[in-house]
Amino acid sequence: MSRKIIFCRIPNIMKIKNLALLASVITTAFAISGCGKGSKSSKGFDDGQLHGVAPASKYNLNKPVGMVYIPPGMFHMGPSDEDINSAFTARNREVSINGFWMDATEITNNEYRQFVYWVRDSIAATLMQLGKDVDGKFQIDWKKTESIKWNDKATIEKIDQMILTPENRVFGKKEIDPSKIIYHSETFDLKAAAQKANEGKPRSTFIIKKDIPAYPDSLVWIRDFSYSYNEPMTKRYFSHPAFGNYPVVGVNWNQATAFCDWRTQYLNAALERKHEATESSFRLPTESEWEYAARGGRSQSMYPWGNYYMRNKKGCLLANFKPGRGNYPEDGAFYTARADAYWPNDFGLYCMAGNVAEWTSSVYYEGAYNFMHDMNPDIRYTAQKSDPPRMKRKVIRGGSWKDVQYYLQTSTRTYEYQDTAKSYIGFRCVIDLSPDMGSRR
């Protein structure tokens, strides 16, 4: 029996200034289903029978571009070899992980640049009034942003607020000030809302609003290494097309989460234009998800490719790291390598060891393994600026191009502060889709 689904259209949030997150996924789904007339049968009259109501008109999302499916499974989280530091911060334990989709590579400069340019264009379009007011809110006409002439004198006059002030210009050249490319993020803290102690509090209590600089910190290449000449990387790494498919660096944890927020709204806006069901959020992987994915089904192995060596049978190094006492170019890359360099693991993920270390969503706590659940283990904390540094530590995994072999092990965990950017830390995203998407991979 065919059933007629009646739905209402959500306003196109893609066109709202700075693409603010207007509501959580749960509320969006409720809003869609709440306007359906679910009591009517396929014959068009109320027959008093239960027919059910779908939350949206259709669901037709294809395989996410650049992502691979990580099937649900169990693995032994923690060291697969001796804890040489005797730190006991990663005790071996058996955990189960639900399926999810993960970027096959680290987010590249080209991919992150799409985010930066979107933020830049949205601010410029607002200053140039390329759009119209709808119900008291300015909506950008994105087709008009494609024709912006950035070097035109009239354009520069209109976006003067984004241009470097005269004392900050070199040879008087008028350029966009990277510090003015600010992304406005609004997210809903479901963890806090679910706490019993917060029951009955207004919804606004759990909405987190942040203004986050989008442009990467290119000075990390100089700042991270004292008495070392790395100026060419500062000048070219993010801006030169030769590095387009290399992993983005100089992005702190806050910027990585902002990218995930933007990517979510960018996808859902496109789905809404096609009157399709919106999806859950892109996000950083949890520490346990990252380790499970990095192992590629090899539960007891030290590295994504297995045990115990860093070379294959031909003597070729299997990752980008610091071989020996510092022979950086021996593995084929002096600094970072292309995000799809070297062989992928059994899940189809590239560079889960080496190249750049990767942010996770998990807060770093030495004893976390002792109390986390054995089902999708996770420990999170949204640190505020006023919190002590200890509360701002986020787990990073995988090791990088400047690390020794130990940090490339899938079980090795370390941390960096969420407001700190490094020349050797990048990230990749994950997303939870409906179970049947796993069969479409």
Image: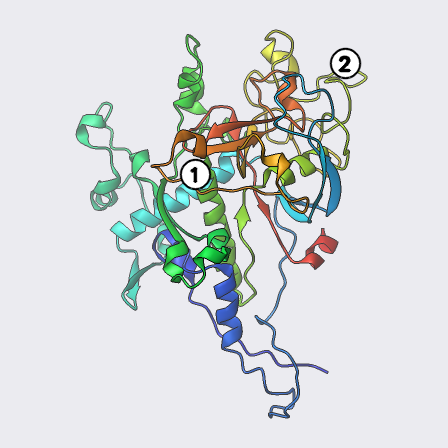
Mark 2 lies on residue: 315
Q: What number is the disc on residue 63? A: none
Instruction: Tell me the quadrant of the picture where the N terminus can be found.
Output: bottom right
Quarter holding residue 21: bottom left
Q: Position of residue 231 (x, y in %)?
A: 40, 16
> Relative to residue 360, is residue 220 drawn left or right?
left
Residue at 47% over, 59% down: 24
Asked if residue 273 can be seen in this view, the reply is no
Q: Give, as a three-letter code, the residue at label 1.
A: Asn
- Residue at the far front: name it: 197
Which residue is at the front of the view, 86 or 12?
86
Whole-number angstrom distance, CA of label 1 to CA of label 2: 40 Å
> Relative to residue 269, is residue 331 drawn left or right?
right
Q: Give, as a three-letter code, the residue at label 2.
A: Gly
Q: Position of residue 62 (x, y in %)?
A: 64, 56
Q: Position of residue 37 (x, y in %)?
A: 54, 83
Quarter holding residue 52: bottom right
Mark 1 lies on residue: 254
